[in-house]
Amino acid sequence: MVEMNIIKIHDMTLRDGMHPKRHQMSLEQMTSIACALDEAGVPLIEVTHGDGLGGSSVNYGFPAHSDEEYLSSVIPLMKQAKISALLLPGIGTVDHLKMACEQGVSTIRVATHCTEADVSEQHIGFARKMDLDTVGFLMMAHMATPEKLLEQAKLMEGYGANCIYVTDSAGYMLPEDVTVRVALLRDSLRPETELGFHGHHNMAMGVANSVAAIKAGANRIDAASAGLGAGAGNTPLEVLVAVLNRMEIPTGIDLFKAQDVAEDLVTPIMDQPIRVDRDALTLGYAGVYSSFLLFAKRAEAKYGVSARDILVELGRRGTVGGQEDMIEDLALTMAK
Amino acid sequence: MKKIKCAIIGPGNIGTDLLYKLQRSAFLEPAWMVGIDPDSAGLSRARELGLKTSSEGVDGLLPHVEADNIQIAFDATSAYVHAENSRKLNELGVLMIDLTPAAIGPFCVPPVNLDACLKQGAMNVNMVTCGGQATIPMIAAVSRVQAVDYGEIIATVSSRSVGPGTRKNIDEFTRTTASAVEKVGGAKKGKAIIIINPAEPPLMMRDTVHCLVAGEPNREAITTSVHCMIQEVQKYVPGYKLVNGPVFDGNRVSMFMEVEGLGDFLPKYAGNLDIMTAAATRTAEMFAENGLANVAQA
């Protein structure tokens, strides 16, 4: 058993939570939730378009405000919490990182598909050079063997990442899948390299997987207030904190305050319930990128093809994060 | 007609595929291939096919340019060394066709602006990026009918078809492509996204093009224009296909494309690489047919 140091909870409400909000969060919603999370003791909060810096597009959705506006509204209000920004190479560029850096983010997370880490050298290198907390974020980690994931993690570590994430973008993993991956990374990466886990709740495994990750050596865990995130949402933050409290694993977060953020601020702004409905469950079951959910539902409404059928086919074709354009294309083909 | 002699700089996948295409050309003759590694498989393959080769880079070629009457060079190396390669060859009157993202010369997307490039008499033309070659004809097909306020392209390519150069410098791809969506495609604002997919067997190159047009889209005229443009591209990339669309949704016009390569040296799924070498060959042929005489006289 790994010694239980403090676990750093990284909040996703204002980034992954942008997916179910179709990136339409108001500045007021974003600042009030960020302040409440800060007050509850959450140490790190991500603020970016759901698809990362530069995600503003027809493909992923135009946001209500630019990344710059969100970051510049939130950052000056924080008392103890630090702010992170996400970037997917191929969508955003180093120019976006420079902007986030100027706004005062403490952390840059560079996300690639789990087998394509070598596209992140420019961006991880930049964040390292700026002396930021630099995270390599290996998405759809269920699609790579533990050995392959380690090879890719080592690339990111070599480019300068001080923390590597096993990212279950599809909410596909079961606790043993998490354990074997995190444990191998813990054994083989530098001891000072931190490890993180990002879960989706599509198979209702968000909390269980996060606990498995901690036991295998992860010390950063992503979670979202009331689970607000893509698909059936992320690991619900307040539930995770309660479980970790019972396990006597410290997080520095006030459980009741975290519950209040979820109940009083986040749940009321949901456009639809964040739950394991048949389509969200299909994401997890078929291993499909969680933010495809609403696109598939919209394609169902427009073209009369079942969202579940679309998602199963996307899984069969091995689609990866960012291929939202495949959904309308496939629906058109299936409707023929 | 006497064939125009060409040199290929860079004996990698792109350079070799280009070599195969040039060998079929009625207007062009590949005469030289240069690299920097004496043990390069690409150089030895070129020698077997009867080309002269040098492993001393462009400097190994320069002393032979005049004697061997090299008039066109293709640079399939990297953006970092391109400027120097181009300067040295331009000085000797060689037209440079740039397949790197260096983009020091004007962008060239053959069915859209090759004629303009010819008239301009540029000594260096840039082939944008694979995603640009595959999508900018579609942006232009819409913008020649109706003003495009915003053009966005999403290129999805197989992991196997993306080399280390592109991976190391993926920002170059997004920046160069977005810029050409504006400058060549005619969109007021351009955005480019690239997705690398590792599925096995490798997926065919896919491209999605979204245009936000000014006002209600003229459906009939846009649809006709798109189909005409596809035929133009098919003249040099027969596997260029419209899978779905144009789809009209408010002021959005979307096209969903697939690009199958010819499978010369590169596999057929690597339509992204094929469309680059095919466009470069087409550009060189047009210069050979029309432009080069003017350039030579100038």
Image (tube, helix red, strand yellow):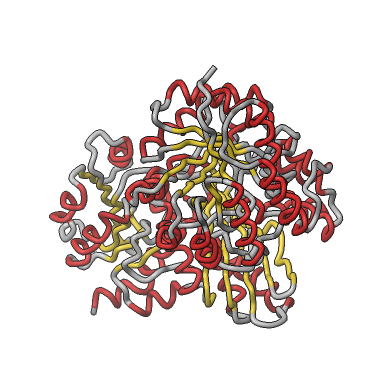
Location of the C terminus of chain A (image quadrant): bottom right
Q: Quadrant of the N terminus of chain A?
A: top right
- Residue visible at 48% across and 56% down in the picture: B130
Q: Is residue B246 visible?
A: yes
Q: Residue furthest right?
A: A304
Would you identify the image quadrant in which residue A142 lies? top right
Q: Give the number of marks.
A: 0
Q: What percent of the width, then of the height, locates residue B282?
A: 44, 62
Vertical side of B270 occupied by B290: above or below: below
Q: Is residue A87 visible?
A: no
Q: x, y (%) of residue A81?
A: 51, 50
**Left or right position of B26 against B246:** left
Which residue appears farthest toward the left when viewing the image?
Answer: B63
In this image, A303 relative to A136: left or right?
right
Seen at 23% across and 44% down, the residue is B53
The residue lying at 50 percent from left, 21 percent from top is A3
Instruction: Return the x and y of residue A223 as percentages of the image width and height.
Output: 63, 42
Q: Nearer the viewer, residue A307 or A175?
A: A175
Q: Return the residue nearer the eye: B58 or A182.
A: A182
Going by the image, does B109 lie left or right of B42?
right
Whole-percent x and y of residue A157?
A: 40, 35
Q: Nearer the viewer, residue B111 or A309?
A: A309
In this view, the residue in front, B5 or A174, is A174
| Up-down relation of residue B121 to residue A307 (above or below) | below
Residue at 39%, 48% in the rendered image? A132
